[in-house]
Amino acid sequence: MKKYNENDPLAYVHLFKTAGTSLQLYFINWFPKRYIPHRDFALEKKIECTKENIEFLKNRTLNPLPNPIFFGHFNGTGDYTYPDECSQYITILRDPFDIEVSAFYYGTDTLNRPYCEGLNTVEDYILFSDFHYSFTKIFTKEIITMDNYKDVIHRNFIAIGSLKNFDKSLELFKNILNVQNPIVLPHRNVRKNKSSYVPEYLREIHR
């Protein structure tokens, strides 16, 4: 993977249901003057990582910011375009099946409604989502395939963590980003109903 350059902008790619809300708190704490949300849904802020905004941050009279850290969801289009001048990325990955299960229960436990209308059981949701969604389209600015993924990762990422090893991933990020603050923060959006039964055959179908 590429070596981290603290003088250049960095983008944290928040993949859906990969503890990004929890990680966001760490980045705010680690880099309070550099952290910039890609988009704040609660405040309905407009996109913050356009080329024009990066230039503004670099050249503003008070507190110029040549090396912002953008944090948020990206998919390359519309309000979620990747930063034009970002050439280094960091993220956490998770088993795609576990992401889908977590998404379903995020809807039922947190939103108090099915995440997708008409998909009222985890079976319905998994069988539907298996055909309509792919994280390979939102991982980087480039479309990632089985042929190019190693090259894309090594060319773009300074580190990739694993949700399964969240604490170790935090340590990895702190070391690579030269973070000195040892703060430990609570995890956010943790599923309450962990005992919910998920038929194992769905994992094989999803795979």
Image (spheres, rainbow, N blue to C red):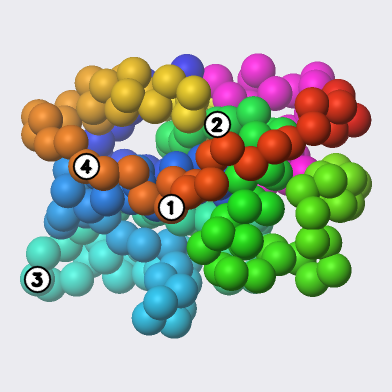
Of labels 2 and 3, earlier in sequence is 3
Q: Position of residue 18 (x, y in %)?
A: 51, 41
Q: Are marks 4 and 1 in contact (CB under 8 Å)?
A: no
Residue 69 falls inside the magenta stretch: no
Q: Nearer the viewer, mark 2 or mark 3?
A: 2
Q: Identify the residue position indicated by label 3 in the image.
A: 62
Q: Which mark is residue 185?
A: 4
1 or 2: tag closer to the N-terminus: 2
* Residue 199 in view, yes or no: yes
For marks 1 and 2, give the one nearer the viewer: 1
Q: Nearer the viewer, residue 187 or 156?
A: 187
Local SS, label 4: loop
Q: Earlier in the sequence, mark 4 or mark 3?
A: 3
Which of discs 4 and 3 lies nearer the camera? The answer is 4
- What's the distance in space between the residues labelled 1 and 3, CA to CA? 36 Å
Q: Which mark is residue 189?
A: 1
Nearer-the-camera pick, 48 or 168 = 168
* Number of residues whose C-alpha sits closer than 10 Å to that of mark 1, classed few (under 14), some (14–19) or many (20 or more): some
Residue visible at 58% across and 37% down?
Answer: 195
Residue at image position (9%, 71%) is 62
Image quarter for residue 135?
Answer: top right
Q: Is residue 52 visible?
A: no
Q: Nearer the viewer, residue 104 or 77?
A: 104
**Circle number at residue 93:** 2
Q: Amino acid at mark 4?
A: Leu
Q: Is residue 126 positioned above or below 97 on the image?
A: below
Badge 1 element:
loop
Of marks 1 and 3, which one's residue comes earlier in the chain? 3
